[in-house]
Image (cartoon, helix red, strand yellow):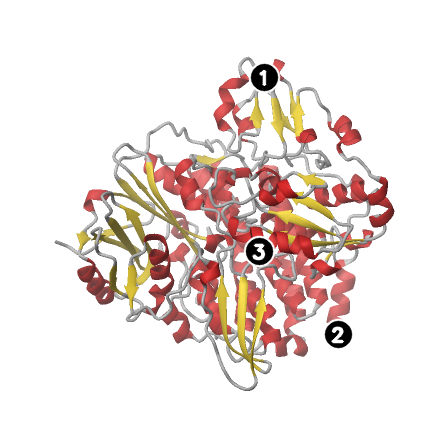
């Protein structure tokens, strides 16, 4: 029996085709493959049995590998994979928390979302050693999470991040009453990415092909979201180093983009734009013209402010060599998306798992030579904004050719039975992975979400090591990870 | 430095001068306008609402639950349900958030916010708020941050977000309040010195929104303590928020 079955992004798989191995065989095979995990989750298989599903990404070939293992009711432990491949650490912790099956010799088996009262922080002893506890409520208007710094004087030895405050049981709610509105509210700063991933899962399960026009509008909206957030983040980084001019200018520049989104969809973050079956709003010719004009201004303003900032030596001294995550570390702990790219890891699911438009519109992956510090993450944002703006321009010009196409396709089909679908969308933070399973009656039986932050929070913990504790806000902002996307 | 100065001059002034009368783009989905005579059987759209905000007999929309997604409007093409671009949606009473047929935004605005003398006398010149995100998705949080940017510039009215509850005159809650945040929220509220106000921001905070069926929530806080102001939206628009507060403290 083959150990893995190969599939693609947004492709339906029959549940019965997924190999079911013993956990020791699966473990060996995972280590042999040595690929990036994007899904590692259990499902209650009846009679006290638990089935563990594993999805690995083969980024070089654009393939996804799926396999599974069945745990009988009295099998309550296995040898952890994290010992051999560290990037599995958070996945195994989550699996343990949800199903009580213990990965033996896991170096870091702490709660992910629950049991915060039982969380045992690492302890450090010494004369000048002290701990700084921050949160769950932070000084600014942001989501809750607890940070515990182990410091020697001003220097951070290690940061422990305890999350779970945002846990709303999203994956269970998705089974009870799945809706586009719920998908949008999982992580409110990645509305388009989440809603696209959800809609693609549902469309694949229902066997619907949406119109080219709808696809293009979704794509344009995704890049708009990326540009808007990246501009806002550049402003926030400027704010954190007390360069208020940058904070103000990037802030108002971001407003231009999100107000354009408001014109497209009636919401500044694009809520209500995407629906299963296509999109709810068309972009008229006039709107295309005015958007293109806005984008020109945005591009010019971002260029101008970024150049001014990067010429300023006091700005550079705060950004350079602060919060560094090396290429090797980033690879080892499995960073994804922006955080990975800034450390020079070449990952971008838009290009690794492309649809036909990436080729047709001539979008090319451009490698970013980052060294993993705040400066790299700042400059990466600048690069991404420029790329997104040029992509939106191309998409909108292409859109003019599809004037009379429908934007919404009927969605009356039933969900496929006993099916398994993986959908990956590159949000501004990185890959947003939605995986859905249906039962023999065509009802959703499992909905699994992986936000890029799930991989990346540990990267932030590594970044602040040997930095001053006062540089934490700057490091944190340069990653800008999601609490709600992680806690679900 | 000259570059910075040049940038400053190039950017000019961008703040919205008249916040209470600021224009809103026509596409914005705000105050719902209902007219059941335009539709033969509005009941057929009962299941479309993701939060149960839309009710029949009589036709009404509960803005405390509504995510303003427009799904009902998209289905009901006869115009029985329309969303105007009117953005002053806040109220001091939970009941008033239920909009029934024939209600106009102008009428709503007259009675929605009940001004209290003791509030205006204490807070009308300065109101410092502590924001607590209790499982908020970062949508309302980003919009609250936007309230302080160079466009909306809420600080000019003496309204600011502060870092410590000890410095605050009240708290602003976003999100459906997860069980894991319930303790921290109550703790924060108790740390705010008296007199203090509580403001609920967004559909999640007011009613649980799309998360109302979740088993991981703990909304006891809302039963224990009085709520002063309800600000609907998903997420709230900065103009909705600032005008709600200005109306409440009667600036």
Disc 3 vs disc 2: which is toward the camera? 3
Near mark 2 (Cα within 10 A), the count class, few <14, some 14-19 or many ≥20, is few
Q: Tag 2, which chain?
A: B
Q: CA distance from mark 2 to mark 1?
A: 65 Å
- Seen in the picture, residue A6 relative to A24 is either above or below; the reply is above
Kindly identify the residue that appears in the image at 53 percent across and 65 percent down. Answer: A479
In the rendered image, which residue does mark 1 sit on?
A: B57
| Mark 3 and mark 1 on one chain | no
Residue B220: horizontal and vertical position, in percent?
58, 43
Identify the chain of the residue marked 1, using the numbered disc in the image. Answer: B
- Relative placement, left or right, of A69 versus B96 is left
Q: Chain of mark 3?
A: A
Which one is earlier in the sequence, the residue at label 2 or at label 1? 2
Mark 1 burial class by Cα count in 10 Å: few <14, some 14-19, many 20+: few
Q: Which residue is mark 3?
A: A143
From this viewpoint, which residue is outermost toward the front? Answer: B224
Task: Give the residue pinned by disc 2.
Answer: B1
Viewer-side label of 2, 1? 1
Q: CA distance from mark 3 to mark 2?
A: 35 Å
List x then y, in percent, for residue A419.
Answer: 27, 40
Number of numbered labels in the structure image: 3
Judging depth in this view, the residue of A223 and A411 nearest the camera is A411
């Amino acid at each position: 029996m083959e150990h893995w079955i190969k599939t693609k992004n947004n492709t339906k798989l029959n549940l019965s085709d997924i190999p079911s191995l013993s956990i020791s065989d699966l473990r060996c095979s995972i280590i042999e493959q040595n690929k990036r995990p994007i899904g590692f989750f259990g499902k209650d298989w009846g009679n006290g049995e638990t089935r563990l599903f594993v999805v690995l990404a083969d980024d070089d070939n654009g393939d996804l590998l799926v396999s599974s293992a069945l745990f009988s009711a009295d099998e309550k432990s296995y040898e952890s994979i994290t010992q051999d491949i560290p990037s599995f650490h958070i996945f195994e912790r989550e699996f343990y928390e949800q199903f009580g099956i213990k990965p033996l010799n896991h170096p870091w088996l702490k709660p992910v979302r629950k049991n915060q009262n039982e969380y045992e922080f690492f302890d450090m002893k010494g004369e000048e050693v002290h701990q700084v506890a921050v949160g769950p409520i932070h000084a600014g208007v942001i989501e809750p999470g607890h940070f515990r710094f182990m410091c020697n004087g001003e220097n951070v030895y290690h940061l422990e991040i305890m999350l779970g405050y945002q846990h709303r049981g999203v994956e269970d709610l998705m089974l009870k009453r799945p809706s586009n509105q719920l998908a949008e509210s999982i992580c409110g700063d990645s509305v388009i990415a989440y809603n696209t991933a959800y809609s693609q899962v549902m469309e694949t399960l229902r066997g619907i092909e949406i119109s080219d026009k709808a696809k293009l509008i979704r794509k344009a909206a995704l890049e708009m979201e990326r540009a808007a957030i990246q501009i806002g983040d550049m402003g926030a980084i400027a704010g954190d180093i007390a360069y208020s001019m940058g904070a103000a200018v990037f802030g108002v520049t971001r407003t231009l983009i999100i107000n354009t989104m408001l014109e497209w969809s009636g919401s500044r973050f694009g809520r209500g734009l995407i629906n299963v079956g296509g999109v709810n709003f068309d972009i008229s010719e006039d709107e295309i013209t005015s958007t293109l004009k806005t984008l020109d201004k945005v591009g010019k303003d971002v260029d101008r402010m970024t150049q001014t900032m990067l010429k300023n030596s006091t700005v550079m001294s705060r950004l350079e060599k602060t919060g560094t995550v090396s290429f090797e570390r980033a690879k080892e702990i499995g960073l994804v998306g922006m955080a990975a790219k800034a450390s020079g890891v070449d990952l971008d699911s838009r290009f690794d798992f492309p649809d036909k438009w990436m080729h047709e519109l001539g979008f090319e992956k451009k490698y970013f030579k980052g060294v993993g510090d705040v400066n790299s993450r700042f400059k990466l944002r600048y690069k991404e904004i420029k790329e997104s703006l040029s992509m939106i321009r191309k998409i909108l010009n292409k859109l003019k050719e599809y004037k009379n196409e429908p934007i919404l396709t009927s969605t009356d089909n039933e969900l496929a039975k006993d099916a398994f679908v993986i959908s990956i969308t590159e949000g501004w933070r990185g890959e947003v992975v939605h995986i859905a399973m249906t039962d023999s009656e065509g009802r959703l039986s499992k909905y699994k979400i992986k936000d890029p932050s799930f991989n990346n929070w540990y990267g932030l913990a590594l970044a602040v090591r040997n930095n001053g504790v006062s540089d934490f806000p700057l490091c944190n902002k340069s990653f800008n990870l999601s609490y709600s996307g992680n806690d679900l | 430095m000259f570059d910075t100065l040049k940038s400053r001059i190039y950017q000019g002034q961008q703040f919205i001068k008249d916040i209470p009368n600021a224009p809103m783009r026509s596409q914005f989905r705000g105050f719902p306008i209902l007219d059941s005579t335009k539709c033969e059987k509005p009941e057929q759209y009962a299941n479309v609402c993701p939060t149960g905000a839309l009710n029949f007999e009589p036709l009404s929309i509960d803005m405390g639950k509504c995510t303003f997604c427009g799904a009902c409007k998209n289905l009901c093409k006869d115009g029985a349900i329309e969303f105007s671009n009117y953005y002053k949606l806040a109220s001091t009473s939970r009941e008033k958030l239920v909009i029934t047929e024939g209600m106009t935004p102008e009428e709503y605005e007259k009675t929605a916010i009940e001004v209290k003398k003791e509030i205006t006398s204490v807070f009308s010149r300065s109101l410092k708020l502590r924001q607590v995100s209790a499982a908020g998705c970062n949508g309302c949080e980003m919009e609250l941050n936007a309230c302080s940017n160079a466009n909306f510039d809420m600080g000019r009215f003496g309204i600011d977000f502060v870092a410590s509850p000890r410095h605050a005159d009240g708290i602003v809650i976003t999100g459906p309040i997860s069980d894991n945040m319930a303790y921290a929220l109550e703790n924060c509220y108790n740390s705010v010195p008296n007199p203090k106000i509580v403001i609920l921001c967004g559909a999640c905070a007011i009613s649980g929104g799309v998360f109302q069926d979740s088993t991981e929530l703990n909304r006891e806080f809302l039963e224990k303590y009085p709520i002063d102001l309800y600000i609907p939206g998903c997420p709230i628009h900065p103009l909705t928020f600032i005008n709600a507060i200005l109306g409440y403290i009667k600036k």
